[in-house]
Each structure stands twice: as structure tokens, then as C-alpha cells.
């Protein structure tokens, strides 16, 4: 009898270990089952139709197609968070991701994302407004806005005076870059408006070197100035020139060049002038028609 009791006592630790292992396995299984049920609930719960963004409203722009904007948004909404929560879930719409993707669309400047209703997403956007072209060699041009930001490539076939070309001898146009600091777009836009009053259609602004700027017109004429001279000085000197009896009809009759680079002296070559005047001899040249000194 004593022997049997002793034998039973020897087996108790093994039975306790088995019981502990079973309880631990049961806990692990219970926790796993709990998380599985939670994940299942999240997976199916976030896909309930009433919680899905189904409508994308797009408004704005002039040249960017609303369909192109909607396509980008729909592509983002078709994704999910870790394959679990869909991006269309009304309470977890990835607005930052949508905005980041939309800003990759050429010419798009500003975007605003709102959610007027639980199942609707509204996209309002604005485009960059081109004011000029920043061009390099081989007709390589970029559209630039009023602050000189290059926001899209311009077609090589785009010619004429709708968007004046800006060329800088020391630089080439680059996407998402700004024109060189020496380019003054406000001055160019101001001068363009003044030129138009005289019937001169600005075609190109050429920064030929570190000192000179040439304004080329569709009529084939050119105005030569110094970079250091602001727009108001150039305008004043032109107005004084065209106010003289001798040159009052110059804008109408046409000219080859007007050179304002030599202080208060202006050198004019009319449209009938023959040959070219060397740049280093412009001041002393007798073939150029010299206007009266402008004080």
C-alpha cells in the first residue's frame, strides 16, 4: 500500500506540467482567436458599402482634364493599408497620399481636398498660369509662371509672341527650377505692356552676357539695354525718344535696332540701314543713326 502511494506521488509533477502546458496553449489560442476575430471584423467592417467613398468630384483647371485628376485619385483609393483597411474607408481616406500624387501632375499648382459627405470626395485644383517660356538650345523650352518657376515642358512648335521667350546664355531650362536670379520677370512683363502700346510685339528676351539684355520683336527689330537698368528707366528713355519729331513715327515705320546701352545717348538704326555695326564700335559709328542726347 505504501509502495503504491509513493508511485503516485512520483507522477504528480509530470501531470502538473502537462496541465500548465495545456493552459498556456489554450491562452495562446484564445489570444490568437481574439486577434483573428478583430482583424476579420476590421477587414469586413471597413468594407461595408455605407462606409465606402464611391464618388469623386473634380472641379477647376483649364487645360488639365478632370478625368486625369479623377483617375489619379481613384488609383490611390483602390489601394489599402497593409492589405487590411481599404483607402476608400470613409474615416481613413489617405488625403496626404492623394495630394502628393496629384502634385506630380504637370501644370497643377494648388489642390484642395474635402469630404462634403461620407461617401464623397471633392477635389478642387488650380493650374499654373504660364507667363513666358524659359528656353535653351534646340528649341528646348519650359513654361514659367509669374515668379519664374518652370512647371511644364513647352512644345517646340510653340512660336510667336503669346508667351515671350527668355534665354540666358549661362543656363539651360530645367523642370521644377527657377529662372536665374538675374532675370526680372516683373520688369519684363511691365516692358511688354509698354511695348504693346507702341505696336511692338515682344518675341524674346535674350540675356546675351553678364551686362546686356536684348528685346527682340516679331517685326524683326531689337532693343538693346543694360541689365542694370530697371524697367522704369528703359520706359522713360523710350518715351523721350518717341516723343521727338524725328523718331515719333519710328514704332509705326519700323526699325532695325534701338541701342540704349550708352548712357544718355541713343543709337537708332532704321529698317533701311545696311550692314551691321560692330558692338565695340557702336558709340563712334557713323553708319548708325544717332538720336539727340537724352538728358
Image (cartoon, rainbow, N blue to C red):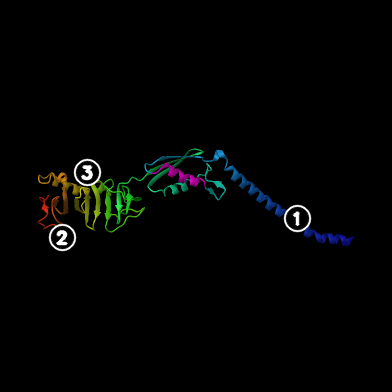
Q: Which residue is mark 1?
A: 19
Which callout, 3 or 2, points at the residue further toward the start of the chain?
A: 3
Q: Does residue 293 appear left or right of residue 160 in this picture?
A: left
Seen at 43% across and 40% down, the residue is: 58
Please name the predominant secondary structure of the magenta segment in the image.
Answer: helix
Seen at 68% across and 52% down, the residue is: 29
On screen, 56 above or below 275? above
Q: Which residue is mark 3?
A: 196
Q: Of helix, strand and loop, which one carries label 2?
A: helix
Q: Which residue is mark 2?
A: 280
Q: What span is in magenta?
A: 64-78
Q: Quadrant of the N terminus?
A: bottom right
Mark 2–mark 1 CB contact (< 8 Å): no
Q: Position of residue 237 (x, y in %)?
A: 16, 48
Q: Of helix, strand and loop, which one carries label 1?
A: helix
Seen at 56% across and 46% down, the residue is: 85
Q: Position of residue 9 (x, y in %)?
A: 82, 60
Q: Is residue 182 visible?
A: no
The residue sitting at the top extreme is 117
Amino acid at each position: 500500500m505504501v509502495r503504491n502511494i509513493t508511485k503516485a506521488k512520483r507522477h504528480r509533477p509530470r501531470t502538473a506540467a502537462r496541465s500548465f502546458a495545456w493552459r498556456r496553449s489554450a491562452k495562446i489560442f484564445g489570444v490568437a482567436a481574439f486577434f483573428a476575430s478583430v482583424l476579420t471584423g476590421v477587414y469586413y467592417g471597413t468594407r461595408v458599402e455605407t462606409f465606402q467613398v464611391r464618388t469623386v468630384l473634380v472641379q477647376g483647371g483649364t487645360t488639365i482634364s478632370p478625368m486625369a485628376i479623377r483617375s489619379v485619385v481613384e488609383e490611390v483609393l483602390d489601394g489599402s493599408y497593409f492589405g487590411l483597411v481599404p483607402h476608400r474607408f470613409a474615416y481613413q481616406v489617405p488625403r496626404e497620399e492623394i495630394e502628393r500624387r496629384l502634385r506630380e501632375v504637370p501644370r497643377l499648382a494648388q489642390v484642395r481636398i474635402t469630404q462634403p459627405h461620407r461617401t464623397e470626395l471633392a477635389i478642387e485644383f488650380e493650374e499654373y498660369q504660364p507667363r513666358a517660356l524659359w528656353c535653351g538650345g534646340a528649341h528646348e523650352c519650359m513654361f514659367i509662371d509669374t515668379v519664374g518657376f518652370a512647371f511644364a515642358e513647352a512644345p517646340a512648335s510653340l512660336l510667336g509672341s503669346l508667351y515671350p521667350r527668355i534665354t540666358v546664355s549661362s543656363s539651360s531650362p530645367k523642370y521644377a527650377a527657377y529662372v536665374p536670379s538675374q532675370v526680372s520677370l516683373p520688369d519684363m512683363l511691365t516692358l511688354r505692356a509698354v511695348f504693346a502700346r507702341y505696336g511692338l510685339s515682344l518675341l524674346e528676351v535674350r540675356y546675351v552676357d553678364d551686362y546686356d539684355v536684348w528685346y527682340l520683336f516679331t517685326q524683326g527689330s531689337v532693343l538693346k539695354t543694360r541689365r542694370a537698368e530697371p524697367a522704369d528707366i528703359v520706359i522713360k528713355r523710350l518715351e523721350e525718344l518717341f516723343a521727338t519729331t524725328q523718331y515719333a513715327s519710328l514704332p509705326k515705320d519700323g526699325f532695325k535696332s534701338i541701342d540704349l546701352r550708352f548712357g544718355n545717348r541713343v543709337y537708332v538704326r532704321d529698317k533701311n540701314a545696311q550692314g551691321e555695326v560692330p558692338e565695340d564700335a557702336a558709340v563712334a559709328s557713323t553708319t548708325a543713326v544717332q538720336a539727340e542726347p537724352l538728358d
